[in-house]
Image (cartoon, rainbow, N blue to C red):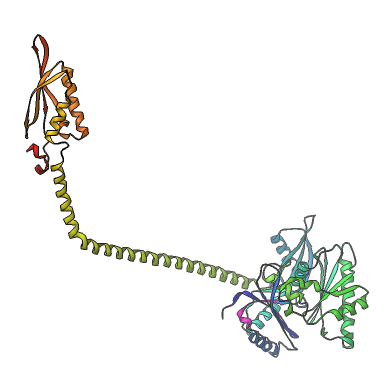
Amino acid sequence: MARKSNVISILKVDPQEIARLRVQKSSKGVEVLSYDMTRGPWKAEDGSLEKALKDFGEQHHLAEDAIYTVISRFDVTVRILSLPTQSPEETASMVRLSAEEFVPYSADELIIDQCMLQKLPNGESKVLAALAHQDVVNNHLALLRSANLDPERIFLSTACLASAARASLEPTEEPVSIIDLASGGLEIIVLTAGQLQFGRGIATTQDWSVTGDSASEALHELSLEARGSLAAYRRESEDAIPVSTVYLCSELTGTQFWSESLEHETGKECRPADFLSTLITRGKEQITMLPAVLLGAALAAQDRAAVNINLLPQTLKQVRALEGTKRRFLFAAGLVAIVLLAYGILYAQAVHQRQSYIHDLTREVAKIEPNARGVAEKQEQLNILRKQIQRKGSAIESMDAAFEAAPTGRMTITRFSYDRNEGINIFGHAMSVDDVHEYAESLRALAKNGFDMLANARSVYWNKAEERQTPIFAYLINIPFVVTENADELPSENR
């Protein structure tokens, strides 16, 4: 079944306990869907732990979620180092080079990760380094895979505990200690102004779920380890400020009894880490304990933890990165294919609609073509008829306009001739040659008012003569007709 990417299961597995915190991805806090736990004891050697995990996974449908797991501090070597650099790359190199100083193994046998806790004013940095033997991590992965579980990341309990405390506890300049009563041991960290300063893990077989007289041995061990750890912190701390306040948390049991008992034993102020509940924005009723490590892991799974350690083997990280790239590529390719397919469908639909429209238009044209042809013929006949019956521009009107255009008192028209093929000739006398030219120009100007016949009017000749002892000019103005392509379009007067 495919994983639901928006639902996360945080697993903590050991021979004494299997716990699962199921959360919904959110932008703020932790939205708890459920908290499930079952107790052992089991053994890895006889397969009982594997069977218990498989049964737990099937019962709670773990394979449906994105799985993240936590490895306890007891199984990993952890150091808080001061390094002379603030570069993440240089920090990683320094931690790897110095790894063999902290564990009796070569660096090639280790899975190493580190997280910068604080940048110091002198250019140095404080770094949390985790060094896990490959066998520890590989056995953890093999156990999960036997239950058909494949974790996205493997967190360190110290980093998760510190992240949960930093996200929920109001920072103070005085150091405070947080003790996690975990399955298989206990873990103690110290924070100053919200920064992780000290951490220690102690493996133990004590059962923290007991109370009263049955808890005397466990309480004695707790008080001894608490005193020893806080004393070790004072020795390592630069300012040597003692811890006066201790908070207790556990995913196994309530911590009120242990807080009161430890306060009586140590004389320090001890109280349950109730501030952790502020991390839960929804589903507080699902949890009656204070599972700080699991809450911190839920923040880390959503990339909102202040301290990040991932002990997943580098080869597996590379495979995951390659798979992620492949998924993104396939998604992008699928998206492009869908877009192209959509465009193809739209184009095919557009072509089909266009062809259908053309087909419809062709049918309509076929229907109306006979009528349209008849209309065109009728229109042509009407144009001929209109030209035949219109008066403006006819030969008679053109001659009338020509006579009206003659300059009054300056020239006379003695006679004119009209021939349908040759045109109109106007004869007369004028007082000057300019009058003749002005008359011809006036005739041509009439063509703009619809008398097209007069467009080619021109003076053909003039002769100077004398009449009653007054000089005059005899003239001839010719107005040729323009022959049209269709003789039927000539006005009737021209025929």
For the record, the magenta segment spans 61-69
Residue 223 visible within the image: no
Quarter of the view holding residue 271: bottom right
Q: Where, quadrant-wise, is the C terminus in this rendering? A: top left
Up-down: is 164 above or below 90? below
Quarter of the view holding residue 182: bottom right
Q: Where, quadrant-wise, is the N terminus in this rendering? A: bottom right
Total number of numbered discs in the rendering: 0
Left or right of 394? Residue 322 is right
Q: Residue at x 47, y 65 (%)?
A: 336
> In this view of the protein, which residue sits in the foreground, 380 or 467?
467
Q: Residue at x 57, y 70 (%)?
A: 324
Residue 443 in the image: state x and y as whole percent: 17, 27
Q: Is residue 62 magenta?
A: yes
Residue 5 visible within the image: yes
Left or right of 372? Residue 318 is right
Quarter of the view holding residue 375: bottom left
Left or right of 26? Residue 2 is left
> In this view of the protein, which residue sits in the foreground, 73 or 161?
161
Q: Residue furthest top?
A: 469
Residue 265 in the image: state x and y as whole percent: 93, 78
Q: Is residue 441 magenta?
A: no
Left or right of 123? Residue 411 is left
Residue 133 in the image: state x and y as whole percent: 72, 76
Residue 373 in the image: state x and y as whole percent: 17, 56
